Every structure is written in C-alpha cells, then in structure tokens.
Amino acid sequence: MKRLSKGIFLFFLIIWTAFQICGCAPREEKKDTRESSASEAGTEVVPEETGPKIGVSIYRYDDTYMKLYRLELKQYLEETYHAEVIMRNAGGDQKEQDRQVNQFISDGCDGIIINPVEMTAAGALADACSKAGIPLVFINREPKEEEQKRWEEKHMAVSCIGTDSRQAGTYQGEIILETPDQGDLNSDGVVSYVMLMGEEGNEDSLYRTEYSIKALEEGGIKTEKLFSGNGNWNKDEGKKLAQEALASFGSRIEVIFCNNDSMVNGALEAVEEAGRVPGKDIYLVGVDALQDTVKYIKEGKITGTVLNDHEGQSQTAADTLVKMIDGEEVDTRYQVDYIKITAISTFHTVKGED
C-alpha cells in the first residue's frame, strides 16, 4: 500500500512538472519590486510624468545672445513641463530651417518653436505647421504685423514673443543723456557718434539705430553721425568697424552706439587698442546685457546696455506654446520689456556664457 501511494505521488509530480514546463500551469503574477518596496515603506510610487514633444529651430548657434536664450528655453521646458526638447541649429540657412521644421512635423512633435533665419519665410512656416495641426511660436525675430493679423483672422494656432526695439533704442539714447555731459565730451554743443548696426534690413537693427538718436535729439541734443556700418551682431566685425571709424575720425568720436553687446564688446577692444579711455573720453553703449558687458559696465569701461530679457522671453514662449497644445486660446503676440543697465542702476541677475 505504501509503494502504491509513492507511485501515485511520483506520477502526479511528473505531470505537474510537465505542465509547469509547457506553461500550462497558472503562474504567479509578477510584482513590481519598486511597488512592493514602496508599499512596505508606506509610500506610493508616482509614475514619471511625460510631457509634450517640442521641436526648436534656432537661426544660429554662434549668436551669443541666442545661446543664452536657447539654453534657458530648453531648461524651462524640461523642468516645468517635462517636455522632450529637440533643439536644432539652422546655421543661418533658411532652407535648412525649412527642412528642420518639416522633420519636426514628420516626427510628430506636439509643438514647434522657431527663431527664423529670414522673416520673409514666416508665412510659409506658419502655414506648414497650421496644416499639420501643430501649434507654433516664433521667438526673438518678430514676423510683420500683417502676418500676425493673418494668424488671428484665420484662427491659426500661431503666436510670437517679441520686444519693441524702439524701446531698446530709446533707452540707449537715454543712457547717454544721463551722463554728466549728455554725451558731449568736447563741449561743442554736438554729440558726434559712430553707429554699429546689426544685419542690413533687420527690423531690430533699424529701430535701435533710429530711436537711439531720436532720444538724444528729443532730449535737446544736436547730433552728428561720423560713421556707420553693419557688424551683423558679431564681436569681430564690430571691432573691425570700430577700428575703421577710430582710424578715420580719432578723437572726434564721442559715442559709439552698438545694436548689440557682442559688437560693443568688440568696439571696446578697438577703443582700448587705440589708446582711448572708455568711459572718460569716449562712451560706448549696447543692447542685451551679456555677462562680459555687464562686467565692463561695473568697471566703468562701457557706459550702459539694455537688458534683452532672454529669461522672460523664453519662459513666455514655452508657456504660450503649451497653452496652445492644451487647446487654450492665446494672443498672437506677447511683448517683454527691455530694462536699462548702467553703473548706477540696480543690476539684474544675468546668466553667464559657458
């Protein structure tokens, strides 16, 4: 009897083992070890949040200001919205930017941000994104007013984040007006100046140039333009233009206006190499409030700059895009104000260059 029981037991053991090998026996449900550990610890596992997929095309990576802008934009999108950010460099080539945007669309991005190479391409880019049903935000370079009206009239999910470059130019002129001699270092009743401009035909460049001088003249100061040239927002080109101006006009130059800080930093090098004493026998003023420029202002070498708030702009761009992705109504344009920065003003925190 004992032998029979043992045989039956072995028979059933073999059958059970076969079922286990074939996968026919019911399996014990696998448990997430993290969940078990968390349960034992009395805490609940919160799944990692997945945010929107955002494509960003920047007109050029070697633009110092846009480097600060794009780094802040990426960080803010990732930290605030848990976004997957695909950042691309158009390298100053509009065809390359068009290709990048088409790739963002093909890749199924939830939203797109564009710092346009050419403003004339804004309409086609807006149409491509709108046709694909993908919200779009333009940054730093602002499409023309008629284009913005078109977005509104056609109820397109397109917006832009910009500044008023007339304000930047006005603040530059006011900075010179606030100097002890109002820019008239030789006391001849006229401020003789050099103007280093950005890209030819660029709206920001045109407005900053026009309104800086307009502010001086509206402040009761007579002006004389000695020299002007397009430095294309570049430090080395700005330095070369300043060298040319100094070689031609020497001590007659009282103020060098620059459309951005990269050029004013280059102009400062040219001024010092020419033996002039910046801040004492010549004034320099820029736009952007780059880290080096702010340092030179504190040292008294550059008279002032105008903070082009990349943090405020990038965060507004991200917030606006996510609202559109979520189906919310937004304005077609948001403006972020400039801020004057001088040696006697309150210095704002400016992120440094890597």
Image (cartoon, rainbow, N blue to C red):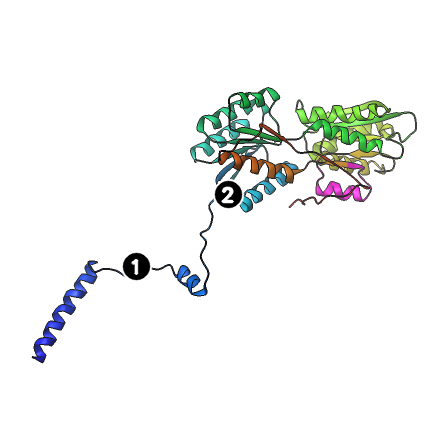
**Residue 5 located left or right of residue 315:** left
Task: Count neighbours of disc 2 (C-alpha within 10 A) and say few if under 14, some if 14 to 19, many if 20 or more.
Answer: many
Toward which corner of the image does residue 274 lie, by quadrant?
top right
Q: Residue at x 70, y 40 (%)?
A: 290
Figure quadrant of the N terminus: bottom left
Could you say where residue 173 lies in the image, as x and y percent from the top left? Answer: 79, 29
Q: Which residue is mark 2?
A: 83
**Residue 353 located left or right of residue 223:** left
Residue 82 versus residue 69: which sits nearer the camera?
82
**Residue 257 located left or right of residue 18:** right
- Disc ID at residue 29: 1
Residue 35 lies in the magenta-colored region: no
Q: Give the Cα separation between the discs numbered 1 and 2.
A: 34 Å
Q: Amino acid at mark 1?
A: Glu
Q: Amino acid at mark 2?
A: Ala
Furthest toward the bottom, the residue is 2
Q: Secondary structure at mark 1?
A: loop
Number of numbered discs visible in the structure rendering: 2
Q: Nearer the viewer, mark 1 or mark 2?
A: 1
Up-down relation of residue 45 to residue 310 (above or below): below
Residue 289 lies in the magenta-colored region: yes
The stretch of residues the image draws in magenta is: 288-304
**Residue 239 located left or right of residue 39:** right
- Disc ID at residue 321: none
